[in-house]
């Protein structure tokens, strides 16, 4: 008897963790602090919502099927924005729009891989990437990171086999928050190119990178699109999570193959979401810059308040974009501890076991803190609760 592909992977950590709080009773003086998910909980800014409303009324084709690879206006706008950001020349035919960045990754794997192929992914990994590889019959080859949570290209080189199709990186990283240095990203690109494989680079959180300007120079490489597959999401920049709008930048020939997958799964990306993303590119650069300043301030708040936990043996392993990644000092698995935190501290955060292979003991001591939806006061309150655990 065959086993369905969905049985080959785990339940989404977001889905599983929500079950922990369904029947929990949080005291009035200790409401839940939810640092489990990075998605913005606020709606898009009012001018953007008004633009969506106008489009729903005035733009007839916003309710119809559209081009599989996205509306030409959005593809051109994103190509222009990326060209400016990376000081490069990116063309609209190198851009495809997808129904969220998860679908961008799924389309990429569908166009690259057959059963039994391999993708190298650093650990801790983004769990949805691992889940999709499992359900696609593709082996996720774990690339362990060092104490700084940055993967080593030399270690990746030793993992490449005849079945390797790509190396997949996320920077700024989810779950660790770490911003990969430009020389590291360049080294991975060169490694992929020299081995005839692809470099998948997910930069969903690039708008909240603490570094000014381009975080790497890959787009200035001749024929960059023969090696690089760049993924992006509009969900974080413009709070368009529910509209599901992501993007891919790579060679037109590879996008042609991805188009088969996208046409079969969704036919076209959400039209109103695409119109919103286009309007955002054209009108919200200053607003996004303000959002970045706020996120960077919350990042600073994590660093400012962490000494209270460090004094108890906690370690800050990674920090950036929407995430802090920490190691706890207790003699228990982070999975067990996470469930106790819900009931004993009214804190929901994801254990490192949800980002690591089962045979890697590191995850049992680690947690991801997604801080995008709590301010400085909330961060101080979170650390106060963690510092006063009765474990």
Image (cartoon, helix red, strand yellow):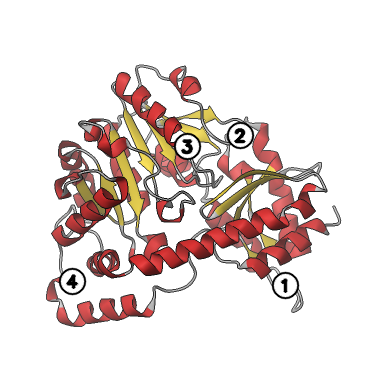
Q: Are marks 4 and 1 in contact (CB under 8 Å)?
A: no
**Residue 245: % across, % down:** 31, 59
Give the residue drawn at x 52%, y 65%. 294
Q: Nearer the viewer, residue 138 or 204?
A: 204
Task: State the image quarter where residue 300 is shown.
Answer: bottom right
Read off the residue under disc 4. Answer: 62
Q: Distance between the residues labelled 2 and 3?
A: 28 Å
Read off the residue under disc 3. Answer: 181
Q: Which of marks 4 and 1 is nearer the N terminus?
A: 1
Q: Please, what secondary structure does the residue beneath circle 2 have?
A: loop
Q: How far apart are marks 1 and 3 (CA)?
A: 42 Å
Q: Please, what secondary structure does the residue beneath circle 4 have?
A: helix
Read off the residue under disc 1. Answer: 26
Q: Are marks 4 and 3 in contact (CB under 8 Å)?
A: no
Side of 279 where 8 appears, left or right: right
Q: Distance between the residues labelled 4 and 1?
A: 43 Å
**Dot 1 surroundings within 10 Å: few (below 14), some, or many (20 or more)?**
some
Q: Which of marks 1 and 3 is nearer the N terminus?
A: 1
């Amino acid at each position: 008897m065959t086993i369905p592909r969905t049985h080959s992977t785990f339940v989404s950590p977001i889905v599983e963790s929500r079950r922990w709080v369904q029947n929990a009773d949080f005291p009035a003086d200790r409401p839940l602090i939810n640092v489990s998910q990075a998605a913005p909980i606020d709606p898009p800014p009012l001018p953007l919502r008004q633009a969506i409303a106008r489009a729903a009324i005035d733009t007839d084709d916003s309710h119809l099927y559209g081009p599989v690879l996205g509306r030409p206006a959005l593809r051109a706008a994103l190509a222009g924005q990326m060209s400016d950001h990376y000081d490069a020349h990116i063309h609209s035919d190198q851009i495809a729009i997808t129904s969220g960045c998860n679908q961008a990754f799924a389309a990429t794997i569908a166009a690259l891989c057959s059963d039994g192929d391999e993708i190298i992914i650093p650990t801790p990994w983004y769990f949805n990437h691992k889940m999709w590889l499992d359900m696609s019959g593709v082996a996720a080859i774990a690339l362990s990171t060092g104490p700084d949570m940055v993967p080593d290209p030399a270690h990746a080189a030793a993992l490449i086999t005849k079945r390797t199709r790509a190396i997949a990186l996320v920077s700024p990283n989810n779950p660790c928050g770490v911003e990969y240095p430009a020389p590291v990203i360049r080294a991975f690109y060169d490694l992929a190119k020299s081995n005839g494989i692809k470099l998948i680079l997910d930069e969903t959180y690039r708008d909240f990178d603490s570094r000014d300007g381009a975080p790497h120079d890959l787009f200035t490489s001749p024929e960059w699109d023969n090696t690089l597959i760049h993924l992006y999401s509009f969900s974080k920049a413009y709070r368009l999570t529910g509209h599901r709008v992501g993007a891919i930048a790579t060679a037109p020939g590879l996008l042609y193959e991805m188009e088969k997958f996208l046409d079969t799964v969704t036919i076209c990306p959400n039209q109103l979401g695409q119109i919103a993303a286009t309007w955002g590119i054209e009108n919200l650069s200053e607003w996004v810059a303000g959002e970045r300043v706020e996120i960077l301030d919350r990042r600073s708040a994590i660093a400012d308040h962490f000494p209270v936990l460090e004094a108890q043996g906690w370690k800050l392993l990674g920090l950036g974009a929407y995430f802090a990644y920490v190691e706890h000092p207790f003699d228990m698995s982070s999975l067990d501890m996470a469930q106790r935190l819900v009931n004993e501290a009214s804190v929901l955060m994801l254990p490192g076991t949800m980002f690591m292979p089962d045979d890697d003991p590191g995850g049992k001591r680690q947690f991801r803190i997604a801080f995008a939806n709590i301010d400085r006061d909330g961060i101080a309150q979170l650390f106060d609760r963690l510092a006063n655990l009765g474990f």
